[in-house]
Image: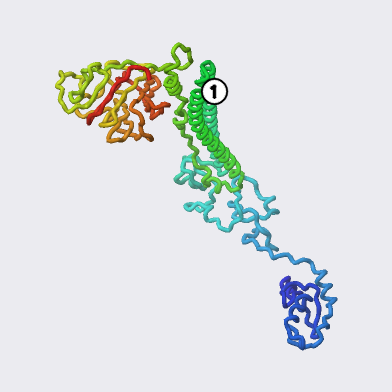
Amino acid sequence: MASSDLRDELSCSICRDIYTDPVSLICGHSFCRGCINRKLDSQSSKSYSCPDCGAEFRDRSKLCKNIVLAKVVECLPPIPPEKEETAIPCTYCFHSPVPAVKSCLLCEASLCERHLKVHSKSPEHVLSKPTNDQGNRRCSIHNKILEYYCLDDSTDVCVSCFVVGHHQGHNVKFLLDALETKKRQKLEQVLISKEKTNKELQHLKQRRRDVEDKASEMGKRVSSLFRDLRMKLNHFEMTALEVISKQEKKVLQTLADLIDHLEVKREELSGQIRDVEEMCKMSDPLTVLHEDFLHDVEHRNDEKLYEVEDIKDHEISLFLQTGLSDISAGTNVWIHMLKPVDLLLDVDTVSNNVTLSRDLKAIRHSYVDHSRPESAKRFDCSQALSIGVFSSGRHYWVVEISRSGNLGIGVCYPSICRNGYSLMGENENSWSLQYVINEWFVEHDRKATPLPDKVSSNRIGIYLDYDAGLLSFYDLTNPIRHLTTLKATFTEPLHAAFMVAKEGYIKILSDDL
């Protein structure tokens, strides 16, 4: 008797499950004791009936335990759930179907565990997951098994393809050999990329240590300076350390973000290495060769990794200079005192619609044509340059500006065009901070960038580090505030440059801050 028929015979007709404590009614039908009690509870107390045949009886106590049926149920072994038969049986098991564990692409046969042990282990007998569909394992041209791989065309081929077919003379290898070659290539790429990432990571970590050491050293020097001064400088000392701390945090945050990025990238590359190793352990090389994990691994050096802004010691110097100007006389301190250079304007460069002060330090836009002598250096538009040039070193100057009209301050090469409407910032030979129509922005080569914050004072500090290629602008409030820094590689000497329009006014200040 089939297991399903046996289950039916030993099942209660009420709960449809194997009998539990079976009892029989006077009609002979059996039920679980609990099932029949619940059924009889729902019937009239004057007359009861069998749920199967409808036989009636009055005495409910006549529920006799079916001893034979109970013993049969107790001795009945557990009936396992019916297993789902595999769709692919072993080709060589004729007498009874046995599930196949592998299929041989060459033999076009499926193998169980027993037949797999005695199967040929030669490379041409390629094994795969059990399958009845060999269509995608055969060459569509020659109808032969695909047991080779063309590295030149990255495709599967049969023996006829590279002997007499289109792949003749190509770099063709056995599937397993091709898999090993490709695995080695990809691992080499990943390892090279990981090594470069490690070097960049070490560089950034070293930068972080350098920044921390520099910030620590500067902090110690500032503290030492303030300890040697009077108690009234305590508040100023704390303020200076806060400025350093803010710069340190800003630089360290940038470095931390880059380090986190590279550490994540390193983990991803390590993960790729593990993925390559795991995937290549599979027995079916065709599947592995076509997996996406074999995509090319590229490494791109990001130049921005090495352009992380450093702590600006000149900003700290300017900050201290501003606060200590009244009490630093005769005090030997470590800070590099940036004394404003004494600039004079070159009268031969001043345009005819600009009024020049007698001391050659101030210009104002004018609607009157001053009809100055012709000069090859003179601008047609309302601009002027300094007499001297900067070709190396660090320099600092301060200007006083009007809060009306348009104006610009910056630097330019001597080769800047003087003819026509050639304003500084609108060409590759000049860099400037401009105030036009109540908006502040920096400009170079016609690329304008608005300032994130407004300028609050009427004095602007300009700091030039020619060798480092830095041009910084500061709002000389108390404390001073960094506005922006332009970066460039200077190839010519630089003039200090000034522009005024619509009654704008600029004056060069030569005294200390």
Image coords of residue 23 (percent x, y): 81, 78
Looking at the picture, the colour scheme in use is rainbow
Out of 225 and 102, give the one closest to the viewer.
225
Say if residue 52 shows up in the picture: no
- The crowding category of the residue bearing disc 1, from other C-alpha atoms within 10 Å (few below 14, some 14 to 19, many at least 20), is some
Q: Residue at x 54, y 23 (%)?
A: 216
Give left or right: position of 219 versus 376. right
Q: Quarter of the image containing the C terminus?
A: top left
Taking the view exactly as shown, the residue that stands out farthest to the front is 232
Q: Amino acid at mark 1?
A: Ser
Q: Quarter of the image containing the N terminus?
A: bottom right
Give left or right: position of 491 versus 296. left
Image coords of residue 63 (percent x, y): 82, 81
Image coords of residue 24 (percent x, y): 81, 80
Q: Residue at x 82, y 73 (%)?
A: 72
Please give the residue where the numbered disc 1 appears in the rendered image: 216
Image coords of residue 476 (percent x, y): 38, 26
